[in-house]
Image: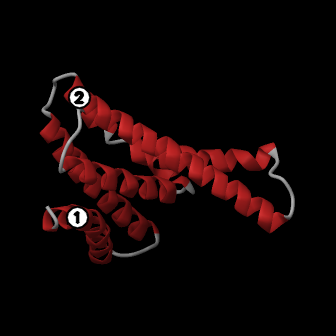
């Protein structure tokens, strides 16, 4: 398992998962105020993942073709699709908690809380891991982790301020 995590941290998809996680967290935070049914939350997160994934793919293809002055070849499309999958994963990940709510294993309000704070935790983890892999010592890495967590916490705080 550690090898898988280390390999993932060395991939280009880290930035895409982080990006998707922030988008997913924003959707969860926005829905919590007037929550729709659990099934609707699941569908909205999946729909957001598909919409943002398609936007990501379209923008990558258009940008590539404009920059390179030719069409994307199949071999060049594969890394773009990997990036799209990583973004979609990051957005849709909170659905795990809403699937548990749909199965009545947890309450929907708990699913919102868990989804929000695991999103913050994920951002903190990536911030810490990136700093350590870049050679920072533990205090500097912890500071980077805190900063990354503040990105997610700011979304939650913003909702609380305007509630």
| Residue 21 rendering spot, x and y as whole percentages | 38, 53
Q: Residue 87: x, y in percent?
A: 49, 50
- Residue at 50% x, 55% y is 16
**As drawn, is 3 to the left or to the right of 57?**
left
Q: Quadrant of the N terminus?
A: top left
In the shown orientation, is residue 51 left or right of residue 26? right
Instruction: Report whether residue 86 is seen.
Output: no
Q: Which of pointers 2 and 1 lies earlier in the amino acid sequence?
A: 2
Badge 1 is on which residue?
153
Q: Secondary structure at mark 1?
A: helix
Q: Is residue 98 visible?
A: yes
Q: Is residue 55 above or below residue 143?
A: above
Judging by the rendered image, the residue that carries numbered circle 2 is 100
Residue visible at 39% across and 55% down in the picture: 23
Residue at image coords 87%, 58%: 70
User: Label 2 neighbourhood size at 10 Å, few (<14), some (14-19), many (20+)?
Assistant: some
Image point (51%, 45%), residue name: 51
**As rendered, which of 104 and 52 lies closer to the eye?**
52
Question: Seen from this angle, which residue lies furthest top?
Answer: 103
Where, by quadrant of the figure, is residue 157 drawn? Answer: bottom left
Foreground pick, 125 / 93: 93
* Element under disc 2: helix
State if disc 1 and disc 2 touch (CB < 8 Å).
no
């Amino acid at each position: 398992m550690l090898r898988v995590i280390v390999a993932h941290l060395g991939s280009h998809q880290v930035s895409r998962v982080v990006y998707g996680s922030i988008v997913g967290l924003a959707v969860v935070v926005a829905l919590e105020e007037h929550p729709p049914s659990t099934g609707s939350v699941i569908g909205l997160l999946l729909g957001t993942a598909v919409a943002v994934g398609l936007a990501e793919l379209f923008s990558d293809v258009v940008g590539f073709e404009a920059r390179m002055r030719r069409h994307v070849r199949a071999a060049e499309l594969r890394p773009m699709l990997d990036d799209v999958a990583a973004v979609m994963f990051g957005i849709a990940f909170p659905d795990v908690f809403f699937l548990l709510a749909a199965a009545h294993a947890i309450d929907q309000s708990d699913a919102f809380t868990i989804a929000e704070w695991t999103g913050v935790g994920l951002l903190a983890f990536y911030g810490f891991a990136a700093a350590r892999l870049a050679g920072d010592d533990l205090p500097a890495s912890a500071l980077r982790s805190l900063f990354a967590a503040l990105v997610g916490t700011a979304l939650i705080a913003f909702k609380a301020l305007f509630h």
